[in-house]
Amino acid sequence: MRKQVIAGNWKMNKTHTEANEFVQATKHEVPSASEVESIVCAPFPFLQKMVEETNGSSLKVGAQNMHFEESGAFTGEVSPVMLKELGVTYVVLGHSERREIFEETDEVVNKKVHAAFNHGLTPIVCVGETLEQREADQTMDHVESQVKKALEGLTVEQIADTIIAYEPIWAIGTGRTATSEQANEVCTHIRKVVGEFANTEAAEAVRIQYGGSVKPANVDELLSQSDIDGALVGGASLEADSFLKLVEAGKHE
Ligand SMILES: O=C[C@H](O)COP(=O)(O)O
């Protein structure tokens, strides 16, 4: 039985004050970590304070990106060593906004996934198709290629510990959610790909989230699907009440 993992991705939103207000409103309210993994992936400047404030609670803190090198002349970048020392435990990698706006390639995403494991961070690896790819019936091939390239070179144990987020790009921030059947169909395919790429145990263990306009009104339906093990949530994770409803839903699946 895989534990559901609900992660908020705040993207480039909130002030330091607002981030702290959110943490104070949620850190004692999230379900026990034995029932559901509750994560907030916040902008870099908020991470240290958020880790300190959530110490001892079931609310965990993640980053939204990082460089794959440990240190060096990479102006503006943040390394896995820095995140680990702060107490950050998760990192979102290869989000479609990073791939599209900042031109991150599959190769870069793969280097980042290795760097995350090398430094004890759990990667949340995002994959997903554009609307054009879906309409051209290329969804499965595209997602399969992204998954294989992201996981290349990992051990079977690392693959089992990876969180994969399936996010159809056409459903992100648009209010247009994939139907639960559409979402599950792709997540089932991802699990099959992991099974062929690693082994059956890794396929059974790997957690696959759905992301794209998830909100309290549709989360139960999505999480009830056989191969959906959680959600990566943008807009609906920004308000404490809404985030708490999402993690509560994860507890029941
Ligand atoms: O990382 C989160 C996704 O991009 C989904 O964002 P959204 O929930 O605002 O559609």
Image (cartoon, grey):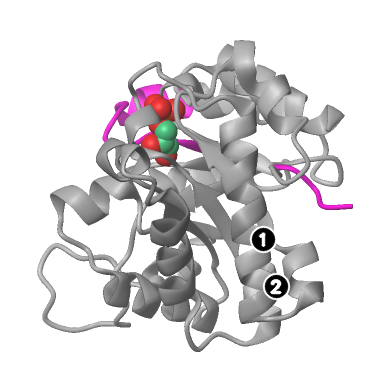
Looking at the image, residue 6 sits to the left or right of residue 100; the answer is right
Q: Is residue 163 above or below residue 114?
A: above
Residue 38 shows up from this direction? no
Q: Is residue 87 above or below residue 216?
A: below
Residue at image x 44%, y 53%?
126
Label 1 and label 2: CA atoms lie apart by 6 Å
Residue 167: where, in percent of width, then height?
A: 45, 42
Residue at image x 50%, y 47%?
166
Looking at the image, residue 108 sits to the left or right of residue 101; the answer is right
The amino acid type found where label 1 is placed reads: Arg
- Asked if disc 1 and disc 2 are in contact, CB closer than 8 Å, the reply is yes
Q: Nearer the viewer, residue 149 or 163?
A: 149
Residue 11 belongs to the span the image colors magenta: yes
Residue 52 shows up from this direction? yes
**Residues rendered magenta in the picture:** 1-21
Residue 72 belongs to the span the image colors magenta: no
Residue at image x 34%, y 24%?
173
Looking at the image, residue 106 sits to the left or right of residue 191; the answer is left
Which residue is label 1 attached to?
Answer: 191
Residue at image x 66%, y 81%?
198
Element type at mark 1 = helix
Which residue is label 2 attached to?
Answer: 195
The amino acid type found where label 2 is placed reads: Gly
